[in-house]
Structures are given as C-alpha cells and as structure tokens.
Image (cartoon, coloured by chain):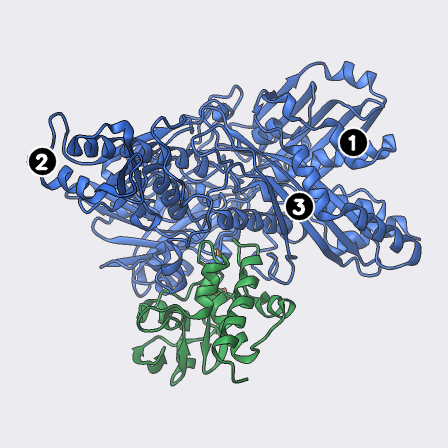
Amino acid sequence: MTTTSPAPEPTASGTAVRRKEDARLLTGRGRYVSDLTLPRMRHVAFVRSPLAHAHITSVDVSEALETDGVSAVFTGDHPALASVSLRAQSGLPGYVETDQPPLARGKVRFAGEAVAAVVADDRYHAEDGAEGVDVEYEPLSPQVCAWASPEEITDPVHDEAPDNVLLSRTFRAGDVEAALAEAAVVVDREVTTNRHGGNPIECRAGVARYEIADRKLTFWSGTQVPYIVRTQLAGLLDLPEGNIRVIAPDVGGGFGVKAVLYPEDVALCLMAMAMPGVALKWVEDRVEHLLSATHAREHRYVLRAGFAADGELLAVKADAWCNAGAYSVYPWTAGIEPLMAGGLLTGPYKLAHYECTVRGVTTNTSPSGPYRGVARPSTVFAMEALMDSGARALEMDPIALRRRNLILPADIPYTMPSRLVDDSGAYEACLDQALETFGLEGWRAEQQRRRAGGGKPLGIGIGIYNELTGLGRAASAGPRMAFRTGHDACTVRINPDGAVTVFSGVTSQGQGLETTMAQVVADALGVTYDAVEVRIGDTDESLWGFGAFSSRQAVIGGGAAHLAGEHVRGKALALAAALKEAPVEDLDLRGGEVYMAGQAKSIISLAEVARVAYLQSDRLPEGFEPGLEGTKFYDPIRGAFAAGVQLGALEFDPATGEIGILSWVCVEDAGRIVHPVIVDGQIAGSIAQGIGGAMYEHLVYDEAGNLTTGTLLDYLMPTSGEIPELTIGHVSTPAANPTGVRGVGEGGTLAPNAVVAGAVADALGVEVDDLPVTPASVWTLLQGVTP
Amino acid sequence: MQISLTVNGERHRVDVEPRRTLADALREDLGLTGTHLGCEHGVCGACTIVVDGRPVRACLMFAVQADGASIATVEGLAADDGTLHPLQEAFSRCHGLQCGACTPGMLMTALHLLDTEPAPSRDRIRAEMAGNICRCTGYVGIVDAVESAAARQRELAPEA
Ligand code: FES
Ligand code: FES
C-alpha cells in the first residue's frame, strides 16, 4: 500500500488546481446527453399512467400513428418489449422478487408509470402522438402508505407480496429487553421523514442507437453507473457485453437518482434495436422527473432507547418502515433504504444492545431509490431525536450526553451493533472544533437574552454522523445482490510524446473527478497536473468502475489511479535506468523529468523515455517490451468512515412560524484532501440538499395516489435566498488507503434534519416528530404550547 | 414562420413553428446548446438568456416573439480569442459550478446584475440570484464568484 520507490514530491494533491472541466462548462461547450444530435435521430415521448393502480384493459395507438411526424408507437405488449422484465435480485432470505416491465403490461402500479412510447421526428410531434394514444383503465384500490395495517390492503401492488412487504430484516446485538429493564430512563419516539428526491438540474436523458450489421448498441446516458448499466443491459437485451458501449459524457448532476437503470432506459434500447440504424433520443422534462424518477426518504421509525443514570446509551429498539414505491429499484432492490437504515441507525454512538426490524414496503407511488445519503438523513434524525429525549429525561446537557457515548479513537476499530466496522474515531475532534467555530457559549447567551428580554425564540440544533464511504467488498455485502461493488480500475498510459492519458472507471456528475484523478496520477507518477488528461464515462475506453454512489470514487477510483500511476512510474524509471545505465534505486521522476539522486539536472526526460518505448525499438534494452502503460485495480475491502458534526442556530417567528437560519457550521473528517475547494464544494452542496429536505422539499401523494407536487412551483428546492452562509471546517485523519482520503459526497446531507428539528425543540420546547419543518408546521406546533 | 434574430452579434434566419420555444430554437435550430433546460416551466432559471438587454427565461418565450431581437447567450461571454469573461473566471476560481447544468443561467443572470449594479452586496447577490436553482454548489461558491467578478470589473473600469 505504501510506496517503496522514492516518493515524488506531491505537487498537485492538496492544492486547488483549476478544474479540467471548467473551461468547457463555463463557455457553453459542455457535452451533455441532452445536447447530443446524431444523423437520422428521432425523439421519444412516453405516455404515462394517470392512475396509481389499475388494470390496462386496452391501448389504442391508431390515432397516434396517424399523427404528423410520428414513425412508431410501442406498448408493453410490443414483441420487442413483451418478454423483458427488470428484476432486482437479492439473495437475502425472505426477499420477494418482482418484475418491472419496460413499459407497463396488464397493469399500472403508480401514476406516472410509462405505458407507451411514441417515436417521432422531434419532441413536439412525439408529444402530439402521445396525446393520441388512448388507454382504457379499470381502477384498482391504491395504497400509498407504507405503514398501513394489512387489513387496509385490498389490492396488493404485486401478487407475489400480499402484504406489500418486499423485504424485512432484523438486526440484533446483545439483549435489548434486559438492558432496557436496567435502564435509569427509557424514552420513546415515533418519527416520520418526508419523501423527496435528487432533482438534478439536468433531467434523465438517453440516446440509443443499434447497428444491426455488427449487432452493436451504443447508449449515451446521463448515468452514474455506466459499467453496471452495460452489464445489466447485456442480460436484458441478450447481447454480448462487448457489443454494448455505454457513454456518460458530461452529466448535469446525479445525486443517486441516476445510479438506477430505469424502465425508460431499457425501453429506449429495446426500441432502438427494433429500429436499427435510427438513433432514438429521450430527454425527460421536470414534470416527468418529479413523477417517475426515483424518490426517497419516506420512512417511519418507532423507537425506544434506554440510558443509564450517567447518560450511557444502553439499548436501542427500533421498528422502521421505508416506502419502496411501486417497484424494487433496479438493480439495487427495495432493500437499499431499509438495509442502510438498520445498518447505520446507531451512527457514531457506542451501543451493545440493539434490535431493529426494517421493512421495504411496496406502494402505488414512484419507486424509491438511492438518493445522496441513502436513508441516513432519516436515521440521524431518528437517533438524534432519541438523544435529545434522553437528555431531557435525564436533565443532562444534550451535547454532554452525546459526548458520553461517542466512539473514540481508543475504540477503533469499533464493531457497530450491525457488525459494520468503524475505522474513524474523529467524532469528538469534529465536535470540539465545531463547537468552537460555532461559538456555543455565545449562542446560549443570546438564547437566554432573548428568553428574558423578548425577541424571536432561538434554538440550537446538532447532528453527529458517520458516513460510510468507499465501501470495499466486505462492507458492501449487505444487500446480497448479484454483483459485489468494491473495486475500480484505472489505466495510466504515457503517450509517445510523454504526455499522460488516464483511463479511469470513475464517473462524474459535477464532482470534478477528471481533476481529482489527474491530481492523484500526476503525483503518483511524477508529472505535472497539466500533463495529465483524464478520460472517464465511456465503457469502450476504460476497463472498469462501479460508478458514483456511496461516496466511493475518491477512495476507490483514486486508490486505483494512485496504484496505476505508481506502477507506470516504476516502469518508466526502470527503462530510464537501463537507457542511462544508472541504478534504478537512485532515480526519481518529478515534473516529467528523471533525476539522479544528488544531481540537480535531469538525466533524461519522460518524453524521451516514451519515445524509445513506442518509436525506437532499436534502442529498447534487452527484456523491455514496447509501450508504457499499466492498469491497476483497487479495493479497500472494508470502507472508510468519515466523521462529521453540524451545528445550527435558528430563530422562529411565533406569529408566523417563519424560520431563520442565523449560523450553520460543519466540521468533517475528509481524511487527506486532494482538492480542498472541490471537497468543500461537495460538503456545501450536500448540506444545501439536506436543508432542502429538512425544510422545503416534499413529494406529496393524495390518497388516490396522485402526486400533488408535480411542478417546481409546488416542489420547492432551496435557492441562494434560503441557503445561509456555511462555515466548513476540517479535521484530517488519513484513512488506510493509497491516497488517505475519506469520501465526502454525502455526509453533508445527513445532519440538517436533525439540526433543524433539534433547534425547534430547543427554541420552543416542542418535539418535532414529522418532517419537513416548515413555517406552517412550526406554527401548528406552537398552537399546542402557547395559549 | 420565418424569423430573424441576432445571437451574440451574429444574424440568423430560422423557420420555426409558432409553438417552438426560443430555448428549443437556440438549442436545436442554431445548435447553441450552452443554454440549458432544467424545468421547461419557468422556475429553475437554467435557460436564462439576455434578450434586448433584459434577462429572460428562454423556455417561457416563443421563438417568434424574438423576431428581430438581439440575444446574448453563454456562448458569447468569452472573447473571440477564448479569454474568459471576468464572471467565468470568477466562477472557476471560486468553484461556482460543479456539474455545469445551472451555470449558463447563473452566468447570464449575474451578467445582467453586474451590468445594472456594479457593487452589489452579498445579500443583494443572494436576492438577485434567487431565481436560479443550483442543485450542486450550495450557492456559497456562486455568491463568492459574483462578488469577486464585480470587484474585478470595477478594477478594470475605474472611471465610475
Ligand atoms: S428551463 Fe426555463 S426556467 Fe427552468
Ligand atoms: S452546478 Fe450543478 S446545478 Fe449548479
């Protein structure tokens, strides 16, 4: 893991180099799938179900086919699609496997499900055609609530699961009942969290083209996971994997929503295969996105915790329901949220006695899928609610109570009650720094001043969290899917002119991975940042990468990039040594020049070494093959936990319920930092999404299963007017991986629910059980306490 | 319908259906895909361009309404030799962009702000930019960038 060759002076890592992506993205020259135009391209519009649950009795496409510009209409029964189903698989005992058709067959299971697809010469005509598709439905009784009692279920969503439960699992450690019996205080909480979603500014987009002569399919897709998409498509389309090329060029945000292979994606590819040589393009609009891209975070937790008199957390007992929506999200399964919830509910706190039953329940709503932070914004809220209740019951300071229970450096490695192994002990260090930056004393004084002298009530909220990042093969075992995500590959190639091209398996939806990979390779290899070009997002170019999820890419893709860079550095130095007849151990490669120990002047340039390797085989020493490149995989086996603490001071207007954020501090342990500004950008962006989920974003279904928040006028995402100035700090404990980094993509989303709800409780003395916290909910809560 | 418009100083004649949005005409008929679409119902601001000196949502305007208009889009911001506009420079330096989907709209909104108010406070910047949604940055870098670009522009044009 550590380098044995003389270490190059790191020049690129740790500095805020200019992002490689910026020049094109700032000048309108980005290459997004939405922008792609190909010869003979046609456009697709989907016809979507207006009903949440119904049998399809007939589909009449005759009028659509008559529409100007329309060339084809597909339905679920079309021979090109009829035999294909997306079936999210898992080996977990009791998991109920169900099918998701690319276009609905026989029945629709949520309002917004695609029922037919119209192909036309442009999107306008495709939408005209879609209006001409006549679908007859026979309504069934819809179920939108994931914690309804079984008697309320008249028509199950899937026949295979009469109680709508697709998955249930109990996590157990120690003896919860005995520990609760001994506790000095026992507290109960029942909390729910609000359904919301990722909503990247670029919606889902795909272009598929099939060439029948060589049976090759190219799929340009705004996906976070091009290699998983290729593997899954190969099975679904019955094509050799090598005949499929998935290209994810510039992608306008992802946040997990684009880590899913959607039925629309599969339908697009199947339709392209039925129309060889014609490129088919589908770019959804925001209304479709809100209706049918994956949602997340609609959970309910029934919780009980026991504390000793000194504040020690003795036991946690929990029941959790996660609304999985109409289909088990492909390929992650309906286990994605419940398993994460049960595995990480206890967060950064030491605990011996734990029992938690989690369920993934199918309903007639849009499917739930991965969204930045997966389940943990809800579990941190639930856990911190227990902490606050415990502190009140014990009349203890809530921060002291938390501190009493944190996993400390001396406890590392700490086996959590779910048997995940925490390698971070930085919670208290983050807490101390966050408290100091925040100025807790000052805010407490201000709170007292307002209590005594009037003024808007002020509350302080806190969230402490552990973000499991960079999951290796041992840590990603939970869902027991058909594939085990743990490794990524990277190829480093020195070109004949000495410049470097990196083929990395990572993908980027704004995280600046081209930049980060270039920094890592530049330092591992010994060249300048500017000499490195990075290619990502094309399955025909790079060997392998599982993609962007679980804050894994800096850790895993970065690890592979470092190892590949080091490997090729070794090769280049060996060749240089042979060419110059110098001992290799005395040589060093820096800034693209090879130096002999103790000499200031370079003995040979990397460009000349490369020229020999490719163009002058007559000069190649005995035993050397031509070319200069290497590929390495990296798998961290476990993962790197990243500690984080957020604190907020919020004020509330008792007359209107209006909420003002006065201060927001976050301190995280990102390990060693490759690009400080990118890291802070990830943290700031994820906090903003967390605040959005805590205070604004709510996807609401009525009882009939109609989405009532179907535009951005009803679904509110925070703007620069709502997100406050954020103060971000770091502690840095390098992780045990090649670059020492810890993932930072998601941590920021984990705390805002807890911070905002905690601040309400602190300011107004009312417990917040349901999210989001809005002026209306604050006002309503206040009616219960003030006369 | 035949219309003519001037985009970033260049005259174009296009034949459009009356229902075609200006955003689609720019992106698909003129190939200027720098103007992005994030909602197509006038909320997100990704499609913001400047029409006859005023910021406009290109998804809410029909192309035919722009007949004879003079339009500025993100493609026209940098100088012909590729030198970035101070706003583009500042967005890069301050990390005012991640995925770049909201960026063209942010830049055009900020361009209009700095044209009309050379020295906006951070609060003013936040208020003026609040019609544009960014899902990536948490806005800190965007506000920093606009503030820094304003300062730079004042340096470059000190006569005021
Ligand atoms: S696309 Fe025009 S405002 Fe969103
Ligand atoms: S940079 Fe991605 S939406 Fe703003």
Q: Residue A401: which disc?
A: 1
Q: Residue A425: which disc?
A: none
1 vs 2, front mark: 2
Percent x, y of residue A650: 75, 53
Q: How many marks?
A: 3
Separation of residues labelled 1 and 3 (CA atoms): 20 Å
Look at the numbered disc 2 and give the secondary structure of its residue: helix
- Colour of chain B in the image: green
The residue that disc 2 covers is A619
- Look at the picture and state if B21 lies above or below A598: below
> Position of A45 compared to A772: left or right?
left
Percent x, y of residue A480: 47, 23
Q: Is residue A101 visible?
A: yes
The residue that disc 3 covers is A752
Quarter of the rendering containing residue A106 = top left
Task: Check the residue under mark 3 and report the chain it is in.
Answer: A
Q: Is residue A84 visible?
A: no
Is the CB–ligand 2 distance for label 3 below 8 Å? Answer: no
